[in-house]
Amino acid sequence: MKKKQIVQLFGLLVFSVSVQAVAKDKNTPLYKDAKAPVEQRVEDLLSRMNLEEKIYQLNQYTLGFNNNINNLGEAVKNVPAEIGSVIYFEADPQLRNGLQKKAMEESRLGIPVLFGYDVIHGFRTVYPIPLAQACSWNPALVEQSSAVAAQEARMSGVDWTFSPMIDVARDGRWGRIAEGYGEDPYATGVYTVASVKGYQGDDMSSDKRVAACLKHYVGYGASEAGRDYVYTEISRQSLWDTYLPPYEAGVKAGAATLMSAFNDISGVPASANHYTLTEVLKNRWKHDGFVVSDWDAVVQLVNQGVAADTKEAAEKAFMAGVEMDMTDNCYQRHLAELVNEGKVPMQNIDDAVRRVLRIKFRLGLFDNPYTKEVKQEERLLLPQSLRAVEQMAEETIVLLKNADNVLPLSGAKKIALVGPLAKNQADLLGSWSAHGRAQDVCSIYDAMTREFAGKADIVYAQGCDFDGENRDGFAEALAVAKNADVVVLCLGEKRGWSGENTSRSTIALPAVQEELLAELKKAGKPVVVLLSNGRPLELVRIEKQADAIVEMWQPGVAGGKPVAGVLSGRVNPSGRLAITFPYSTGQIPIYYNQRPPARKGNQGRYQDIPSTPLYEFGYGLSYTDYKYGTMKLSADKVKRGGKLTVEIPVTNVGGRDGLETVHWFINDPVSSIARPVKELKFFEKQLIKAGETKVFRFDIDAERDLSFVDSDGKRFLEPGDYYIIVKDQKLKISVE
């Protein structure tokens, strides 16, 4: 009996505990239930919010030190507990957790804050600038670098990166060209997908992933004459065939958010453009995340002449489809009044808040609002991250010229290292370098000294500064050059010469740098020019005097080590240009996929300079030679909806292993809408060992790869002849 009573009592106890648990669950809001579906949690929380709390979710403040000189706000000292998001300028999770605790414990509903930051090409482990990354033609490396940036950012208190920047850009005078992936819509789309995957992974709630933000939506890269924040003239046709494709690819890849742009699109600013923000993004592409404005982009609608005051600016931006207002507080000041006046429907407010909350839930912020506080050495500059950044930098380097095979420097016993970048560290980081530090960077001088230890002596002279009129160092530089076997001249740009608000009238280097090269030529020794820059450059005068030219871009913390490996021959350069280098600034805009002109031959061409670029899109040399075999098609006819394959064998006929990229272009010579002379549709990079042959293959889907898009974004495929182009080979395909 005693055993039976004990069992009964135990059963009653279990039942009592279960009842209490159920009662507790009934008292717990559904939005706090980690096991409930995200959409149910969003709707439950939304139903509990008042108008003031909703509007707070649509505003973004700042927290911490603002290190972007173009963003003139000060860190918000008293951030409200209900705020939706902050730009977090610090690299320590402690301050973040302090604000998050305030939000979770002092706000009525305990809605976590979303912490964003401009992690453009690395957080502390800074990678090569995106324009350089594109020259690697290796999307896997882009995904890997984005994953490293996400890991460092999330572990340091940042949940959301304002990256990738995927503006197709063709004007090197525009400083923000450094932040994007070059001039081609298809390539930019491929890198966009890789970047989004790297940032977000399969689960954004991971403590090593962040939400991505596609920017700047849309057409910002078409800024007139390379000037920032200005008008852009973009037809609907160009919008759909050039500027929108990377964004569509990013949305399909699951990008959580987008950022509206500063530019005016044919009279309607991007941050008040209902067509792009709502009709295309939300209605057609079904994007369910949110759009944040760029810094002060809402209030700047007044400057752009479409809003009389900040209230009207708030109304126009919000009703167009911008859910979150970055820093200028227009939404905070005016949305409630606009709702009360009936100018902003409550259903629009609810939809915007729903979108913001959805991303917060997907990031896991409601269930894990705080960042684990660990030491810097456990989250930043990890050994595997540094190895990855070095590999990325190696593959971004483009060998532009190598007369008489002066490179690699296998026989030199004394190398003169000259120029303003030779011992520089900070400027190798590039623009938007987040929390990167100069002391993390290996200078070219230090890298060369280590690379050539026991093989050659490195002698140094600065020669000149980046710009200015001081030529006092020329004599020392010439003396050093005369006593060396070869001269390595390190020229280029400061990190602040590219990036936001860095428009330039010419993309030539300052005269003092070109004059230093001319002075060193007097030594009669081979001169190798190393270039570190954030944009394509005008190199026509440099090209004539240099024996070799190596484009190393701005490589990040890897600094000079990768390029030292190229100079020694340890690394075989494999980079190819993702942006055209014009013969002169006067050719801009110049890009590979222009539409055909009305007249053939030389008619309509420049009369005073060549009309062809100095270095074309896809150009780049190697230390080995490749022989392309004959392209072969699986069929020369295809029906709509059909597929076929094309292959080309590539043989490494040189003496060393190398990475080769094959670019597959198509051409439609006759179309109801004139198409570019060439359109990139696929690319692949493979390692080909000396003497080895690799077969490159392009699987063609006729509807996807041969079709074009009209001014409403609808794809069409017309019957007729199309051509597949690889280097100088063309194969005809007939579409029936």
Image (cartoon, rainbow, N blue to C red):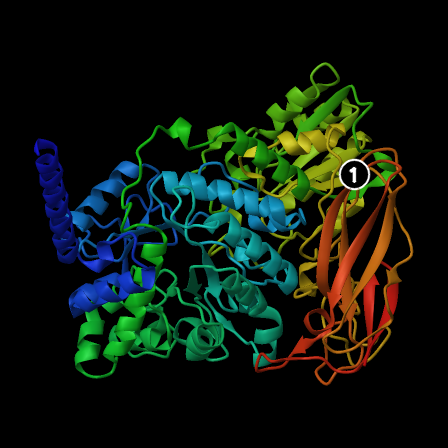
**Which quarter of the figure is the N terminus placed in?**
top left
- Judge by depth and name the residue closer to the eye, 540 or 371: 371
Q: Residue 254 at x, y = what percent?
A: 48, 60
639 lies above or below 632? below
Residue 434 found in image quarter: top left
Q: Name the foreground residue: 707 vs 679.
A: 707
Residue 216 x/y as whole percent: 47, 63
Image x and y of residue 592, in percent: 73, 64
Q: In terms of secondary structure, where does tag 1 sit?
A: strand
Quarter where residue 633 is shown: bottom right
Front one among 429 and 689: 689
Residue 338 rendering spot, x and y as whole percentages: 21, 78
Q: Residue at x 25, y 54 (%)?
A: 33
Total numbered badges shown on the rendered structure: 1
Q: Which residue is mark 1?
A: 658
Vertical side of 703 occupied by 533: above or below: above
What residue is rendered at 62% in x and 40% in y? 392
Residue 14 visible within the image: yes
| Left or right for 27, reference 87 | left
User: Residue furthest toward the top?
Assistant: 454
Q: Is residue 614 visible?
A: no
Q: Amino acid at mark 1?
A: Gly
